[in-house]
Amino acid sequence: AQSVTQLGSHVSVSEGALVLLRCNYSSSVPPYLFWYVQYPNQGLQLLLKYTTGATLVKGINGFEAEFKKSETSFHLTKPSAHMSDAAEYFCAVSEGAGGTSYGKLTFGQGTILTVHP
Amino acid sequence: SAVISQKPSRDICQRGTSLTIQCQVDSQVTMMFWYRQQPGQSLTLIATANQGSEATYESGFVIDKFPISRPNLTFSTLTVSNMSPEDSSIYLCSVEPRGLAAYNEQFFGPGTRLTVL
C-alpha cells in the first residue's frame, strides 16, 4: 500500500520569495514520485518526476524537488515565486516495477499556493 | 506525451439520471485511468481501463455505478449511473503512453465538471 501526505493545505508567499511545498510518502517498494500542478478550471500538468537515478530533479517553470529516502520526503521548491505560480499542487506516488500497484497513482490532498504582490 | 480531450467539459444533471463521459487520446495507449476529484478534495482512482480486458475497479467503486468501455486504443467512456448529488465531482481520464514496459508518467485530460441537482 502507498500513501501521500502534503503538509499544509494552503501556503502563501510573497512574489520573489522561496516556495516550499512539503510531501511525505509511504510505499512498500521503491517509489516513483511526481508533482502535478492544477490551474483553476484546468486539468493536471506534470511538473517533475523521480523514478531512478539523481535524487534532485528539475522540472518546468523553475521548480525542483529532492527525493530523500531516509526522510521519505519529496518536497517541492522554487527559489523565487512568481504570480503565475498561484495554483494547486499535488504530490503523487506510484509503486515502481515489481509493486502490486504498479502504474497506479496515489495523490496527496493538495496544497493551494497563493502568491502575493 | 499525449493530448487528451474529454466530452462534455461540464454538465448539470438531475438525480437518478446517467451521464457518459468520453475520453479521446491523440495516440494509441495501452493504459487509461479514470479519476474522481470531489469538491475540495484530491484525486481518487476509480478504475484502470486497458484495451482488450475488463476494467479493474478500486475499492469503493463498482461496475454497476461506473461502467467503463474501452473499445480501442484511443478511446474510453465512463458512465456515472443513477446519479445523486454526492456524485458531483470533476471526472478526469489519464493515460500512460508507454505502458507497463516503461512506466513513466500519466497525462491527464482537462476533466469533466459534473453537478447533480
Image (cartoon, rainbow, N blue to C red):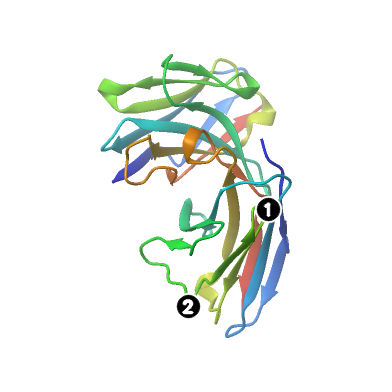
Which residue is most to the front?
A: B52
Rendered position, A74 above or below B2: above
Q: Quadrant of the C terminus of chain B?
A: bottom right
Q: Earlier in the sequence, mark 2 or mark 1?
A: 2
Pick whichever, A56 or B88, lies toward us. Answer: A56
Q: Is residue B45 left or right of residue A84?
A: left
Residue type indicated by callout 1 = Thr
Residue A36 pos. (x, y %): 55, 36
Q: Amino acid at mark 2?
A: Asp
Relative to B43, does residue A13 appear above or below in the rendering?
above
Judge from the rendering whether residue B117 lies leftward or rightward of residue A19; answer left or right: right
State yes or no: discs 2 and 1 in contact (Cβ < 8 Å): no
Name which residue lies at 44% across and 26% down: A51
Query: Looking at the figure, which quarter contains the N terminus of chain B?
Result: top right
Q: Residues within 10 Å of mark 1 (few under 14, many from 20)?
A: some
Q: Chain of mark 2?
A: B
The residue at the point 50 percent across, 28 percent down is A49
Marker disc for residue A93:
none
Instruction: Mark yes or no: residue B103 visible.
Output: no
Percent position of residue A50, x then y:
45, 25
Mark 2 or 1: in front is 1
Give residue B56's quadrant in the image: bottom left
Residue at the disc numbered 2: B64
